[in-house]
Image (cartoon, coloured by chain):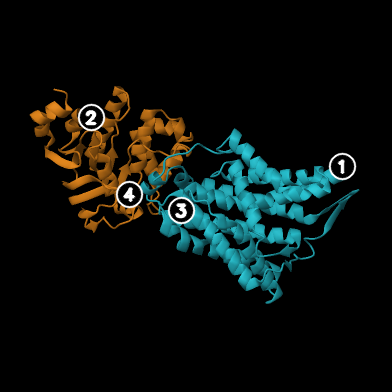
Chain colours: A cyan, B orange
């Protein structure tokens, strides 16, 4: 099969869009894991929560888009923090497998609550018409949304990097991720660092949720689960605990998935997740700590 | 300043500290001596709130510490330079010092204190922008002490500052500890290097398998046959 240059440029932009969504979602996994060694599988469901919140506020309460989106981010952050407080904090210091299983339970709980409250039927979701515009440059046409997603992801990741590098709480987050016990001896209040990590991660996931809903044009109660899993894979490939790693891992997965689909006959494209998890297995075989990961360090 | 009474500390089922009592008075340099596994580090970790005693009390400047979270203990004025230094290797030297000041109020004059630390350890000034992991062992120890001092502590806990250092560096570190004492900082020093520790301490306690075996003035202990035999090699 030979495709035109336009086709590949479009696929490239698709890869950037999808990769950015994974990257934004992966941040939450990596920040929380860096500090607590907790793999929070319920993180992906925040995509769904934020998309439904935005859709509901727009559909039922006729809120303007920016307001509805802001409220959705705030609500997702609230849910993220509540889950931390109720499910994870009581287990702090317990073995990693305990918190891992708990997070799976939380995830299934959230999904089933959503099924109950929201019905399993997918719903349409559309962003303002501005987002769904198509850009034409000569013979190339592509949806603007992929560019917007990329821009938002880049801005958020730069802001996060700046915050982690320069602010007091940012330095404390890096210190806590490297050596929690020493950070406690410096007077770091663990709960405030953990809350910051959950809040930032949740907001990023919420942004990803709205963008993803806009990209696909539909939402359903399980929409966050598989992307969440893939974002987790992205974080592992990049090196869990590393913010750059999460960004790069997300882009690698996004590109890989799109290219996999683009290069194979259409009837195989349903199996695109093969690529994602094959990439994970290969990465773990070659470099278990991921691209930007560091070997294990001292824990409390 | 610090009064520990009958604390009992367990690691799982193992009884690590048994009815340990001691005190540190304002302006004193007190040494806590003992061999590996005697419970010295556990004692310091208990003071800092990283481990909780099952029974007993810890009074520090009129506060009861056994229920106080670690970050509050730091802001009460206790700083802990931990075993094995535990500097943040991926942070720069300067960021490590800033972390040391984490518990302080924003308006404090941080810059003056960074200057003060750098006058104690001039090498840190030269290495300010480097990741702390690039420092030598002795420099890392200096950074660990400097970082602890950045909280402007009233009581400084030092866990084996001489461990693994070349003799010349050990001399330098003890020189600085002497300077800090002269500047009026109260210090609780944990050491295996009993000879050096007793030379600069006012008083000392000897911990053996979780029990305080001996206590007294440093000058007296240095003469005691038991200490001579067990810790000073003759």
Q: Picture coordinates of residue B7 (x, y %)?
A: 20, 50
Q: State the separation of the CA atoms marked 1 and 4.
A: 61 Å
Q: Are marks 2 and 4 on the same chain?
A: yes
**Visible residue check, residue A165:** yes
Label 3 environment density (alpha carbons within 10 Å; few <14, some 14–19, many ≥20): some
Which disc number belongs to residue A98? 3
Q: Secondary structure at mark 4?
A: loop
Q: Secondary structure at mark 3?
A: helix
Instruction: Output the chain of dot 3.
Output: A
Which disc number belongs to residue B50? 4
Q: State the separation of the CA atoms marked 4 and 3.
A: 22 Å
Instruction: Output the chain of dot 2.
Output: B
Q: State the separation of the CA atoms marked 2 and 4.
A: 25 Å
**First reached walking from the N terminus: tag 2 or tag 4:** 4
Q: State the separation of the CA atoms marked 2 and 1.
A: 73 Å
**First reached walking from the N terminus: tag 1 or tag 3:** 1
Q: Quadrant of the N terminus of chain A?
A: top right
Closer to the observer: label 2 or label 1?
Answer: 1
Q: Quadrant of residue A181?
A: top left
Which disc number belongs to residue A119? none
Q: Quadrant of residue A54?
A: bottom right
* Residue that mark 1 sits on: A5
Q: State the separation of the CA atoms marked 1 and 3.
A: 50 Å
Q: Is residue A230 above or below residue B33?
A: below
Question: Is A151 left or right of B48, judged from the image as shown?
Answer: right
Q: Picture coordinates of residue B128 (x, y %)?
A: 45, 35
Label 4 environment density (alpha carbons within 10 Å; few <14, some 14–19, many ≥20): some
Q: Secondary structure at mark 1?
A: helix
């Amino acid at each position: 099969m030979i495709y035109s240059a336009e086709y590949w440029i479009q696929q490239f932009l698709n890869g950037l869009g999808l990769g950015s969504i994974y990257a934004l979602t992966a941040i939450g996994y990596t920040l929380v894991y860096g500090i607590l060694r907790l793999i929070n599988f319920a993180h992906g469901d925040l995509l769904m929560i934020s998309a439904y919140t935005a859709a509901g506020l727009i559909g039922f309460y006729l809120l303007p888009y920016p307001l509805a989106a802001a409220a959705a981010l705030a609500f997702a952050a609230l849910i993220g923090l509540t889950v931390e407080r109720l499910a994870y904090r009581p287990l702090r210091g317990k073995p990693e497998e305990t918190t891992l299983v708990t997070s799976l339970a939380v995830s299934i709980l959230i999904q089933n609550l959503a099924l109950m409250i929201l019905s399993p039927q997918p719903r349409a979701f559309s962003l303002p018409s501005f987002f769904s515009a198509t850009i034409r440059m000569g013979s190339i046409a592509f949806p603007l949304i992929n560019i917007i997603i990329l821009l938002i992801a880049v801005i958020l990741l730069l802001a996060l990097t700046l915050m982690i590098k320069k602010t007091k709480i940012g330095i404390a987050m890096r210190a806590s991720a490297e050596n929690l016990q020493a950070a406690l001896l410096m007077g770091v209040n663990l709960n405030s660092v953990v809350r910051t990590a959950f809040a930032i991660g949740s907001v990023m996931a919420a942004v990803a949720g709205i963008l993803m809903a806009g990209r696909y044009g539909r939402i359903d109660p399980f929409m966050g689960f598989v992307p969440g899993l893939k974002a987790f894979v992205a974080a592992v490939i990049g090196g869990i605990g590393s913010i750059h790693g999460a960004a790069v891992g997300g882009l690698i997965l996004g590109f890989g998935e799109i290219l996999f689909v683009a290069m194979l006959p259409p009837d195989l494209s349903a199996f695109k997740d093969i690529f994602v998890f094959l990439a994970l297995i290969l990465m773990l075989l070659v470099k278990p700590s991921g691209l930007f990961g560091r070997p294990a360090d001292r824990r409390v | 300043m610090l009064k520990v009474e009958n604390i009992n500390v367990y690691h799982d089922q193992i009884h690590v500290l048994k009815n340990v009592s001691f005190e540190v008075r304002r302006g004193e340099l007190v040494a806590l001596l003992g061999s590996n596994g005697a419970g010295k580090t556990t004692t310091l970790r208990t003071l800092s709130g990283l481990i909780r005693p099952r029974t007993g009390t810890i009074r520090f400047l009129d506060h009861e510490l056994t229920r106080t979270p670690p970050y509050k203990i730091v802001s009460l004025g206790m700083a802990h330079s931990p075993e094995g230094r535990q500097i943040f290797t991926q942070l720069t030297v300067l960021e490590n010092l800033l972390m040391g000041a984490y518990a302080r109020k924003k308006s404090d004059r941080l810059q003056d204190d960074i200057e003060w630390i750098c006058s104690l350890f001039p090498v840190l000034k030269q290495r300010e922008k480097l990741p702390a992991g690039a420092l030598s062992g002795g420099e890392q120890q200096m950074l660990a002490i400097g970082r602890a001092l950045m909280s402007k502590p009233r009581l400084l806990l030092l866990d084996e500052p001489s461990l693994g250092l070349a003799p010349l560096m050990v001399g330098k570190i003890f020189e600085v500890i002497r300077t800090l004492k002269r500047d009026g900082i109260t210090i609780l020093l944990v050491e295996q290097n009993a000879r050096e520790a007793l030379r600069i301490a006012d008083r000392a306690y000897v911990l053996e398998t979780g029990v305080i075996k001996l206590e007294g003035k440093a000058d007296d202990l240095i003469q005691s046959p038991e200490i001579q035999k067990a810790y000073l090699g003759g």
